């Protein structure tokens, strides 16, 4: 595969969507996104002969993209993952209160909100980089827990747990936002 | 269970893969308006997430990357031809000079033994071809984007 320019261009075109999902979720600066995405594919090109066919090529490229972004965030000392636990060891939780009888129609209301997609996007952006990346890879790219584990280097069980927490936080944040708008 | 209701993890599991949830929990959701409502919220949330338009780079990434990659080296066909000729000479010359010896050696072996050797070589070849095909098939499927 290495050395064939046309094939490599095709690989870029076929995988840049997945790479964009990861880069956009982890990197906020547009200039940095440009540099990082180029860096990702230059790394892919240099290491293509080392691809062992143990996963899908797109998964391997996504893994390189994830690691490149992770290194960038570590270098810049940016927060990659919110602190998940309180000092006493219990899990930190966004408190949306108990299920409120007055918001039983939350689902219906959300459907009819004009800016629902925008609100959801904003709330996803508020999640930690790791959480929003996991949400995107699972729900938008439809990757399996196993594939996400390969990309992020996390065990399957951890991926599952983080995803459960991320969705719960997202749902609770949306509920809080809804409650505030109601008041 | 939390206050008689299913915890969020179980409700998410119910929406994502109903069959993986135990019968008691599934039955609870069916009979509990509170949990059903929560399940509906998660279901809506998941579908809304899926509806978000994917991000796209506002520049031609392929073009930018390809500009930085060194031009492909032309394969030197002559070197391939030269290596083939040298290999043919290295194998052919001993066979030519020692052909009588080889003929005597083969003539001394019975037809049955020769056939057996031939079958074994053929079987090894078939297994190797099958193995290579399996490898090739695996590699092609891993390129499926």
Image (spheres, coloured by chain):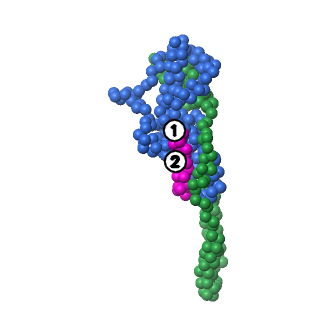
Q: Is residue A28 magenta?
A: yes
Please tell me if label 2 and label 1 are on a single chain: yes
Earlier sequence position, callout 2 versus callout 1 = 1
Q: Position of residue A49 (x, y in %)?
A: 55, 58
The outermost residue toward the left is A88
* Residue with the mark numbered 1: A29
Q: Is residue B28 above or below residue B93?
A: above
Q: Are marks 2 and 1 in contact (CB under 8 Å)?
A: no
Q: Position of residue A162 (x, y in %)?
A: 47, 33
The prevailing secondary structure element of the residues shown in magenta is: helix
Helix or strand or loop: what does disc 1 sit on? Answer: loop
Q: Looking at the image, which residue is at 60% across and 53% down? A: B66
Q: Is residue A103 magenta?
A: no
Measure the C-alpha gap from mark 2 to mark 1: 19 Å
Q: What letter labels the chain drawn in green? A: B
* Residue with the mark numbered 2: A64
Q: Looking at the image, which residue is at 43% across and 41% down? A: A76
Q: Is residue A40 above or below residue B39?
A: below
Q: Quadrant of residue B31?
A: top right
Q: Viewer-proximal residue, B73 or A18?
A: B73
How dense is the environment of label 2, judged by Cα within 10 Å: few (below 14), some, or many (20 and up)?
many
Q: Viewer-proximal residue, B110 or A22?
A: A22
The magenta segment is: A27-50
Helix or strand or loop: what does disc 2 sit on? Answer: helix
Q: Which label number is shown at residue A136?
A: none
């Amino acid at each position: 595969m290495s050395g064939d320019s046309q094939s490599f261009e095709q690989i870029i075109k076929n995988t840049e969507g997945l790479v964009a999902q990861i880069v956009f979720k982890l990197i906020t600066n547009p200039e940095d996104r440009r540099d990082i995405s180029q860096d990702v594919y230059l790394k892919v090109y240099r290491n293509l002969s080392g691809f062992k066919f143990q996963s899908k090529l797109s998964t391997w490229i996504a893994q390189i993209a994830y690691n490149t972004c992770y290194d960038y965030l570590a270098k810049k000392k940016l927060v990659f993952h919110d602190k998940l636990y309180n000092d006493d060891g219990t899990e930190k939780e966004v408190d949306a209160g108990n299920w409120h009888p007055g918001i039983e129609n939350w689902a219906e209301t959300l459907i009819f909100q004009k800016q629902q997609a925008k609100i959801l996007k904003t709330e996803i952006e508020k999640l930690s980089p790791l959480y929003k990346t996991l949400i995107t890879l699972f729900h938008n790219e439809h990757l399996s827990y196993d594939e996400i584990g390969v990309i992020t280097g996390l065990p399957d069980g951890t991926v599952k747990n983080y995803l459960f927490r991320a969705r719960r936080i997202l749902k609770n944040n949306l509920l809080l936002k809804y409650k505030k708008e109601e008041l | 269970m939390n206050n008689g209701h299913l915890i969020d993890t179980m409700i998410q599991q119910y929406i994502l893969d109903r069959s993986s949830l135990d019968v008691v929990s599934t039955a609870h959701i069916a009979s509990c308006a509170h949990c059903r409502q929560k399940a509906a919220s998660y279901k809506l949330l998941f579908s809304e997430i899926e509806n978000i338009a994917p991000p796209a780079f506002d520049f031609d990434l392929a073009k930018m990357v390809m500009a930085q990659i060194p031009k492909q080296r032309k394969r030197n066909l002559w070197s391939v031809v030269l290596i083939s000729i040298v290999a043919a000479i290295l194998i052919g010359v001993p066979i030519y000079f020692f052909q009588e010896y080889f003929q005597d050696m083969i003539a001394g072996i019975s037809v049955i033994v020769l056939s057996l050797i031939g079958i074994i070589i053929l079987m090894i070849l078939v297994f190797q071809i099958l193995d290579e095909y399996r490898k090739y098939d695996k590699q092609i499927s891993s390129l499926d984007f």
